Image (spheres, rainbow, N blue to C red):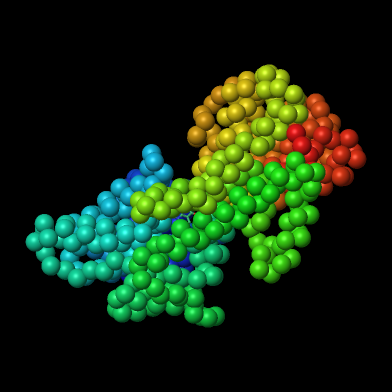
Amino acid sequence: MKVTIFGTGYVGLVTGACLAEVGHEVTCVDVDPGKIARLNDGIIPIYEPGLEPIVRENHEQGRLHFTTDAAAGVAFGELQFIAVGTPPDEDGSADLQYVRAVAATIAEHMEAPKIIIDKSTVPVGTGDQVREVVAETLARRGVDLAFDVVSNPEFLKEGAAVNDFMKPDRIIVGTSDPHSEAVMRELYAPFNRNHDRVIVMDLRSAELTKYAANAMLATKISFMNELANLAERLGADIEQVRLGIGSDPRIGYHFIYPGCGYGGSCFPKDVQALSRIAHSVDHEPLLLDAVEAVNRRQKHRPFEMLVAHYGRVEALAGKTFALWGLAFKPNTDDMREAPSRTLMESLWAAGAKVQAFDPEAMEETQRIYGHRDDLALVGTRDAALKGADALVICTEWKAFRAPDFALMRESLTAPVIVDGRNLYDPDRLKAEGWHYYGIGRGETV
Ligand code: NAD
């Protein structure tokens, strides 16, 4: 099948590469000429395990094309995917300008019937808006062409995006049109050999399903962080509590890790957007707003722990802190809404310096913050410790799980760890003379 994808970010590029990998012909369109030029040179603009080889191979095989030419993109595919960003507006609601722009572009250039598939995460009702934009543009052009708008939200996880796309838990298709349903089933048939993963529903339910999934996951995290903060004050260990509740199959072990808050491009923005959607229909989303508020507070915990350790905020001035982990989660270079940013910005405001290491996100950190005297990005985990006054961990990269604690003690000026991801055993570290602060681990600081 011939497929066009507008937007070559995490979602668009992975979708394009994976559809090409199973034999479809794909053209990816982006408005960013630099990105398209790099992709045509075989350079992948993001870090995503397993993505580079399939992009390169399918590009070389002629099944995956990259262009800035929107008209050529519209002419190419019977299926036109919208996979552009939907960032938060000033009030937290999803900014749909890029989605609308693509809809208008498709309608501006189409000369044959198209199925327009929305893969971006969008508020309920956006499919209808896309339909209106396309219909109005076609009417203005004086052409009468059939088209349908389908919702096909994406559930991939950054860091495991290729695997998630190739082996999806479910493929949500929001349409009431039998032809569109049949085309979508054919498109995804290669991902469905083991069992049918396609769930067809009406367009609005499909749009809401995406927000519901992310809001549920964010709720699990904020719930555990709420309990972790309670555990600290009560002298309990949230990690024991986690094991205790996870053993109940109705709760399960997945996604109940306490930590220094969730980040990334999806959970913060989608919880806020769903809250705005609720307000727009006169429903006060008490739970969603609490999920967001708990997370905002949680991102400050590592900094608060340092302040508590030194007794007052002024004591941080002039100190240097080693930071392990910058990306919002492991296996990605994505820094959007990362808890490390909250920490670094608080440390800088307090007059402290940061000496940081991340396996993938250092270039992105440099891009965001530029060169500054109070930020040193160093090449290894161990180099970040040299001469630092304490270590803070913000991302649970595998390489941080089993460090050489003796070497760490020699490198740091004092044995202090703030472990924002609960990687270590507090009893062992305390027995070895460390000041160890985990999240919800019986410490009240
Ligand atoms: P992104 O910011 O990484 O990429 C968006 C791309 O769209 C950019 O390359 C941008 O240049 C391009 N673009 C903007 N306007 C365009 C236009 N008119 N024509 C062509 N290209 C255009 O975004 P992303 O992370 O891939 O997210 C895309 C959507 O998918 C969002 O709605 C997001 O919420 C959703 N989503 C993201 C993830 C994720 O893990 N990142 C997962 C599921 C769903």
Q: Residue at x 35, y 79 (%)?
A: 182
Report the residue that reaches farthest toward the left: 142
Q: Residue at x 69, y 69 (%)?
A: 249
Residues 367 and 245: in front is 245
Q: Quadrant of the C terminus?
A: top right
Residues 83 and 207: in front is 207
Report the residue that reaches farthest toward the right: 431
Q: Compared to 136, does 357 lie above or below?
A: above
Q: Residue at x 66, y 51 (%)?
A: 224
Residue 65 appears in the figure: no
Residue 287 in percent (x, y) is at: 52, 52
Residue 390 in percent (x, y) is at: 75, 30
Q: How many marks?
A: 0
Q: Quadrant of the N terminus?
A: bottom left
Residue 103 appears in the figure: yes
Q: Compared to 130, does 258 lie above or below?
A: above
